[in-house]
Image (spheres, rainbow, N blue to C red):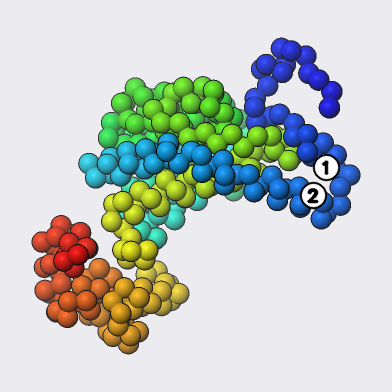
């Protein structure tokens, strides 16, 4: 691999480095390409695992902030923004939370989810503008996502978040990046050069997906939106999910599917109330009262 002039090598983003293992990628067979990609991908989970202490700090901050009325707001561009949108959009149906609680801002807006919006990520001002639009508060948590850690849109948002005294978290592949310097908590799995140079939708994108899975899921578990390992607050928007709700109740209560379906109907399709009814053998109104007295804490309402 030819060397670069010292000044160019210094300025080049870490995410743009060439991967020695894939220098002759275009000469490989399909099987060899896939094996190479698989070898590189296997490294990602291990590298994310090394970031668990930082991820855990972020989860604790997110859960604490939400309890105080704050929100989780992701900010990203391109692949990073699309992964943020994906994670945020899954939280309401999975955990029964409002769409405002977990939000994702992507450079270029809604159109950028399905197509490239030229120059959208280059505006520092737009990052700040979009956070102003959602009325950022000090009790919110802003997670800036950028593999290189240099995306102007994300940097603009993070600078504005710091000004508003919101908690800032960076998810990046470059610990020494400007993004990392703006964050209170830095999550930086160094996944190394990509199989296709600069294509951060590969290992960097995979690491971001894993981290976002952890941030949102662990936060929602800590907030009580999961009972044992069951989606007790799942929104029943289709037949598949209605069937899942019956199985959740059967698993959690030890009752059969018929009893679970009956309790679900009686409760107005509220899984928490239905579970209390089944486990304690009480009426719908009594179950609702117990849940209210426990301030929504399901385990407390069950006497656990």
Q: Quadrant of residue 251?
A: bottom left
* Tag 1 and tag 2, C-beta contact below 8 Å: yes
Q: Is residue 205 something one can see in this rendering? A: no
Tell me the quadrant of the picture where the C terminus can be found: bottom left
Tell me the quadrant of the picture where the N terminus can be found: top right
Q: Residue at x 51, y 22 (%)?
A: 178
Q: Position of residue 38 (x, y in %)?
A: 70, 51
Classify mark 2: helix, strand or loop.
helix
| Mark 1 crowdedness (10 Å alpha carbons): few <14, some 14-19, many ≥20 | some
Q: Is residue 293 something one can see in this rendering? A: yes
Q: Quadrant of residue 247?
A: bottom left
Task: Report which residue position mark 2 lands on.
Answer: 33
Q: Which numbered dot is residue 25?
A: 1
Q: Residue at x 37, y 47 (%)?
A: 102
Question: How many discs mark residues in the rendered view?
Answer: 2
Classify mark 1: helix, strand or loop.
helix
Question: Considering only vertical position in the picture, is 198 above or below 249?
Answer: above
Q: Residue at x 52, y 33 (%)?
A: 188
Q: Position of residue 100 (x, y in %)?
A: 34, 47
Question: Farthest top residue?
Answer: 7
64 and 269: which is toward the camera: 64
Question: Farthest right residue?
Answer: 27
Question: Considering only vertical position in the picture, is 35 above or below 253?
Answer: above
In space, the residues marked 1 and 2 are separated at their CA atoms by 7 Å
């Amino acid at each position: 691999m030819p060397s670069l002039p010292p000044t160019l090598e210094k300025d080049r983003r870490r995410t743009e480095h060439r991967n020695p293992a894939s220098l002759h990628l275009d000469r490989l067979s399909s099987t060899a390409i896939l094996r190479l990609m698989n070898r590189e991908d296997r490294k990602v989970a291990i590298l994310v695992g090394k970031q668990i202490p930082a991820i855990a700090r972020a989860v604790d901050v997110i859960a604490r902030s939400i309890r105080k009325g704050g929100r989780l707001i992701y900010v990203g561009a391109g692949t990073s923004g699309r992964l943020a949108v994906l994670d945020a959009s899954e939280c309401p149906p999975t955990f029964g939370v409002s769409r405002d609680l977990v939000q994702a801002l992507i450079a270029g807006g809604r159109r950028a989810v399905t197509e490239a919006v030229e120059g959208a990520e280059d505006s520092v001002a737009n990052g700040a503008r979009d956070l102003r639009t959602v009325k950022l508060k000090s009790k919110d948590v802003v997670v800036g996502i950028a593999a290189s850690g240099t995306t102007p849109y994300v940097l603009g948002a993070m600078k504005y978040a710091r000004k508003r005294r919101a908690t800032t978290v960076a998810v990046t592949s470059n610990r020494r990046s400007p993004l990392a310097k703006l964050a209170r908590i830095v999550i930086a799995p160094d996944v190394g050069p990509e199989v296709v140079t600069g294509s951060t939708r590969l290992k960097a994108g995979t690491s971001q997906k894993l981290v976002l899975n952890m941030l949102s899921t662990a936060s929602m578990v800590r907030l009580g939106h999961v009972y044992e390992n069951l989606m007790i607050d799942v929104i029943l928007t289709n037949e598949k999910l209605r069937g899942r709700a019956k199985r959740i109740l059967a698993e959690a209560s030890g009752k059969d599917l018929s009893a679970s379906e009956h309790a679900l109907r009686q409760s107005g399709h509220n899984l928490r109330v239905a579970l209390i009814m089944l486990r304690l053998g009480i009426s719908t109104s009594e179950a609702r009262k117990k849940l209210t007295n426990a301030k929504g804490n399901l385990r407390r309402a069950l006497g656990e």
